[in-house]
Amino acid sequence: MTASAADVPEFGGYRLGRGYRIADTDLTLGGYANLDVMAPHSGGSHAELSDLSLFITWQASEHWRLFSEVEVEDGLTIREGHGVDAGPAAIRLERLYSDFSFNESANVRVGKFLTPIGRWNLIHADPLVWTTSRPVVTQVPFSQRSAGAMVFGDIPLLGRNLEYQAYASVLPDPARHPDDGEFGNAYGMHTTYGEPGRAQIGFSYASFRSSPASSAAQNLFGVDGFWTHGRYELSGEFVYRRSSGVVQQDAWGLYAQGVAPLSERLYAVGRYEVYKGVNASLPAQLWIGGLAYKPVTPLVFKLEYGAGTHTTAETPVGLAASVSVLF
């Protein structure tokens, strides 16, 4: 799954995928870019520079760090029958937070951060995941970003590692992403136990309201897992979101994904998804198969095809391809 250090391009001391530290400062620049080509069954084929993200990290002291992510979305799109659309691009503040570390077991984060539900949402950057498409259950049932405070850390337990995150999303988000629902007065936690990078199981819980005027509280429960052996990998997540007193607004879903090496740098990827959204009479089912090629670790080319039953706008199917690079 990884390339040796000698395989990764280096330019004047900068190595692709590791960010660039500005000399004689505590600032590090990084980010990623992603180009998608989509041909859904419903029509409307297009290619777009879907993401161009800039990371800025300031290690102010041994214990204090500031991090920001600014993303340019939809900067360049070529649509079937419409030609090139070069703007205007959307500039979004994805993350902005400050961390204070007491030790590995106790850290405090304040600001805007990725909501710690499951695995995928915390990884999320295109060069770090295996497919162009994202599982529906990792983005629709909850807000992908939170604004507030979080405590987190790693605790050794019975020869393994317990990672925990407990958060409160109680601050207004003036730069809320259009894909995110309301997530005010949200409280939750996520724990993961096992061996990082080898085998882990995680549990998520969140309580929130989907809009300020909503009288129904949402309670979300989730389980996620990860296992790898050699260059083989299995992962999956299950989420159930219940609305108090309104059964029709319940939603649930899951995915299971497997990765197998075909050669030194080429991988086969398969995923099965089920998602039952609000008021859906039958759950949608999706089967996705594809390839991922990594000439070097920070660069990945992906090709996939998806088909399914009872699909909706939340569960698009068809052909998708992308190229992603981590800076």
Image (cartoon, rainbow, N blue to C red):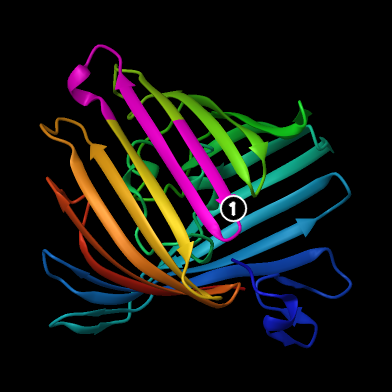
- Number of labels in the image equals 1
The part of the image, by quadrant, that contains residue 231 is bottom right
Left or right? Give the position of 231 relative to 4.
Answer: left
Residue position marked by numbered label 1 in the rendering: 229
- Residue 50 appears at what percent x and percent y? 38, 69
Whether residue 237 is in magenta: the answer is yes
Say which amino acid is labelled 1: His
Q: Nearer the viewer, residue 109 or 212?
A: 109
User: Which residue occupies 61% across, 58% down?
Assistant: 230
Residue at image position (65%, 36%) is 194
Q: Which residues are magenta?
A: 223-251
Q: Is residue 39 visible?
A: yes
Task: Tell me the chief SS of the magenta region.
Answer: strand
Q: Residues within 10 Å of mark 1 (few under 14, many from 20)?
A: few
As helix, strand or loop, the secondary structure at mark 1 comes to strand
Does the magenta segment cover residue 219? no
In the rendered structure, the answer to whether residue 274 lies left or right of residue 25 reads left
Instruction: Report the side of 1 relative to 272 (left or right).
Output: right
Viewer-nearest residue: 286 or 242: 286
Q: Please name the residue shown 42% across and 25% down the image.
A: 221
Residue 181 position, x and y percent, is 35, 39
Look at the image and tell me in which quarter the N terminus lies.
Answer: bottom right
